[in-house]
Image (cartoon, rainbow, N blue to C red):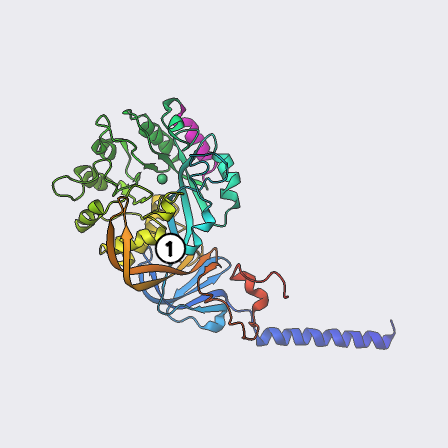
Amino acid sequence: MTRKSLKQTLFALALCAGVYAFAQQAAPEPAYDLLLRGGHVLDDKNHVDGVMDVAIKDGKIARVAAHIPSASALKTVDVKGLYVTPGLIDIHVHVYAGTGERGSYAGDLSVPPDGFTFRVGVTTVVDAGCSGWRNFEDFKDRIIDRSKTRVFAMLNIVGAGMRGGKYENNLSDMDGDATAAMALKYPQTIVGIKTAHYAGPEWTPVEQAVIAGTKANIPVMVDFGVDHPERPLYDLLTKKLRPGDIYTHMYSGLRHEQDPDTLGPSKAFIEGRKRGIYFDVGQGGGSFKWSLAVPMIKDGFIPDSISTDLHVTSMNGAMKDELNVADKIMALGVPLKQVVAEMTSHPAHEIKHEELGNLSEGSIADVTVLRVENGNFGFTDMVNRRFDGKQKLLCELTIKDGRIVYDLNGMSADLWTAKPDAHAAEARKWTTFAPSHEH
Ligand SMILES: [Zn+2]
């Protein structure tokens, strides 16, 4: 290299550096990745109920405040007129799909989670007992580790899992110690113990579930199976379960949930709630009746948590999805703010994952943007009776770990005729929909 060309090269390098420095100075990297502006924030845990902007950075909630300037974010989405909530948590689903087993919740009766979650604002689900300690690791490998939805699990107290009566009534496969050992092996993923569908008169499933739940320090969720006078609901809720355990299918009417005289909650329910038992909806295919929900909610016995009991039968039946179940509770007069709490902070607390279900600064940026539609809507129950309502929730936008994973109307996308976004190159920081290359 000649002395002259070296000089020219150095000059060119200096110029480049100068231009680069100037460019950096002129357009500093915005402080936030994504900004939701002008929405009505409902954050039960932090007692926020009002119009606020929400800023997200590196997958975490960075700031929630009244006026955050657009220029401070790579991408701003206008959400005026909409509700901004923590990502919804559905603590009763069945998602152990894909094994090929017929007539089994560890198989054909389950659904793959991602097709049913983000589109209704759900970012976290809890599989309620499809797997037991014997097949949990297969479930984890097959579904949990491969899903975009955050999937937690409650282990079935039956080691073989929820695979039909032949397995689920086998008392010799209900081992609280083995179940606890598996739960303790995966404390980040296993959030509870499930007992369900038991047809016999024994307390064994409940007792073993409580042993497992106590050893692993996680709650037990009960589907109380076939009604038996030998194991009354009153004893379950006042003696057998611990405070913090969860009674699902609360409006099913299959096991004396309702007081036959007042039509309000039974004495078992009233005493159970006093003791700190949580009551969960779990509509499913056959576990929600208007003849219970209407008088019990009128009486003040509202859910602690709203869940779906999603599976192949409920998905197209009366249940439909998480928002449809929430619509039903709203139709009975429970305010939106409370309904959102029952899908966010409450279930997060029940499964002891308090890092979820809130918009605290620094917490995981799972966020849902909901529209309240006004009109005439019909909502059905397990006996195909209808209750009419005037409001319906619609999910516009779902954000998981700080990135947009669902966008019903493309509100985060630029119009096709617009000039490329100034920050298009960094789009992957705020959306999963960014093109993988420029062409
Ligand atoms: Zn279920």
Q: Residue at x 11, y 40 (%)?
A: 261
Residue in front for this viewpoint, 383 or 213: 383
Choose top left, top right, bottom left or bottom right for residue 110. top left
Q: Residue at x 85, y 77 (%)?
A: 4
Identify the secondary structure beneath mark 1. Answer: loop
The magenta-colored residue range is: 173-187
Residue 361 at what x, y percent from top left?
Answer: 41, 59
Q: Does the magenta segment cover residue 185?
A: yes
Choose top left, top right, bottom left or bottom right for residue 55. bottom left
- Chief secondary structure of the magenta span? helix
Q: Residue furthest front?
A: 384
From this view, report whether residue 358 is shown above or below residue 240.
Answer: below
Q: Residue furthest top?
A: 172
Mark 1 and ligand 1: say if the CB distance to the nearest ligand atom is below 8 Å: no
Q: Is residue 281 visible?
A: yes
Choose top left, top right, bottom left or bottom right for residue 310. top left
Q: Which residue is identified by label 1?
A: 358
